[in-house]
Image (cartoon, rainbow, N blue to C red):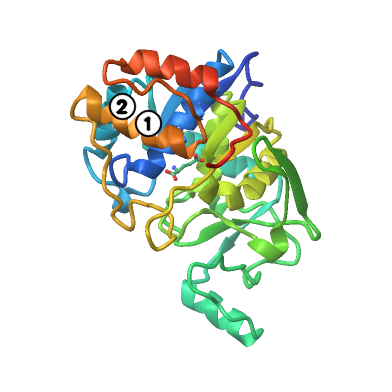
Amino acid sequence: MPNLKNPSPPPDGYRGRFAPSPTGPLHAGSLVAALGSWLDARKNQGKWLLRIEDLDAPRCIPGVDQEILRQLLACGLSWDEEPTWQSRHQERYQKALERLNALQTVYPCVCSRQTIASALEAQGVKIQRNQEIVYPGTCRPEHIKVSEKIASPMTDVAWRLALPPNLSIEFEDLALGKQHQDLNRAVGDFVLRRRDSVFTYQLAVVVDDAEQGITHIVRGQDLLSNTARQIYLQKVLEYQTPAYLHLPLVLDEHGEKLSKQTSASAIHTGNGQEALQALRQAAKHLGLRDLPDGKETSIAEWLLAATQAWNRKITFS
Ligand code: GLU
């Protein structure tokens, strides 16, 4: 049996990260996540790593990864250690999936969106737009066995994680306090590798955070509903669970989250003044007050003051 054991335990000390998907350049919302995670790492004398989450190739735009790197550097948000790209780590995700298979916790699924929707409709469940679809368990066998097929990328099946009944995950968010989610009611058995052989965000993020020894995850609140899934997966894979802090989202004029999908405009970082302006906006959103606002302030000076002012209990204006 190949060595499928989990990565070594995180080293001592804080290790944070920023993990953008290269589906568009940084906008006001993603800069908040970048700045918040950078400040939290710097305030705690920690390391801040950069990971490009480019597994879903059709959604990624060529060259945008380099654009994000340039934007971060223009804002003075420098990273420690070499940046990494998820598309280069297929092997580690496959190994994690094989380990889950050996633990008899995954099963193949041939359901299409349509079959899932029909099965839910038959149960009288109405699917709302933008709502998480709870998998009804159509393909779940009564007894899960180790499957031999898992190694083949050609099998045209998705792989789902089988959840035990009554799985309530609780965690303490460093900004929001106690959180909990009943995973069966919220999502059901979720997908780890899609039918087109793409490893999902849930699996890849958990494996990479563990591989990179991440101790603190600071990111936008749009990802809060994913955290319980990730904590459960960490437990099954015997990884350490990092601390979590979810930051307030930037909303557009319709009250919707700013996102690359809704073509939020890229932050301007063409010169120091523009970059500082973008940083100031992000800091305001994070509730940071009394930062140097003079024209002469350098980015380095401003970031130092912002690090001193950083407070995890974010208060809104
Ligand atoms: N790649 C994800 C995104 O851009 C972030 C993942 C994370 O921080 O866990 O939304």
Residue 313, image x, y percentages: 63, 34
Q: Which residue is under mark 2? A: 276
Quarter of the rendering occupied by the N terminus: top right
Identity, as a three-letter code, of the amino acid under mark 2: Leu
* Mark 1, secondary structure of its residue: helix
Measuring from the top left, give residue 310's x and y in whole percent.
Answer: 54, 24
Q: Position of residue 226 (x, y in %)?
A: 59, 50
**Mark 1: amino acid:** Arg
Residue visible at 59% across and 36% down?
A: 314
Label 1–label 2 contact, CB within 8 A: yes
Relative to 178, is 126 on the left or the right? left
Which residue is label 1 attached to?
280
Q: Is residue 90 above or below residue 198?
A: above
**What residue is rendered at 44% in x and 23% in y?**
291
- Decide which of 168, 144 is in the foreground and name it: 168
In which quadrant of the rendered view does residue 301 lie?
top left
Quarter where residue 32 is shown = top left
Q: Is residue 19 in sight in this rendering?
A: no
Instruction: Using residue 73 as the reference point, say whether residue 29 is left or right of it.
Output: right
At horizontal 45% and vertical 36% (from top left) the residue drawn is 284
Q: Which mark is residue 225?
A: none
**Quick one: label 1, few (<14), some, or many (20+) residues within 10 Å?**
many
Measure how far apart labels 1 and 2 are at the Cα level: 6 Å
- Residue extending farthest to the right is 166
Q: Is mark 2 within 8 Å of ligand 1?
A: no
Vertical arrangement, residue 120 with respect to residue 73, above or below: below
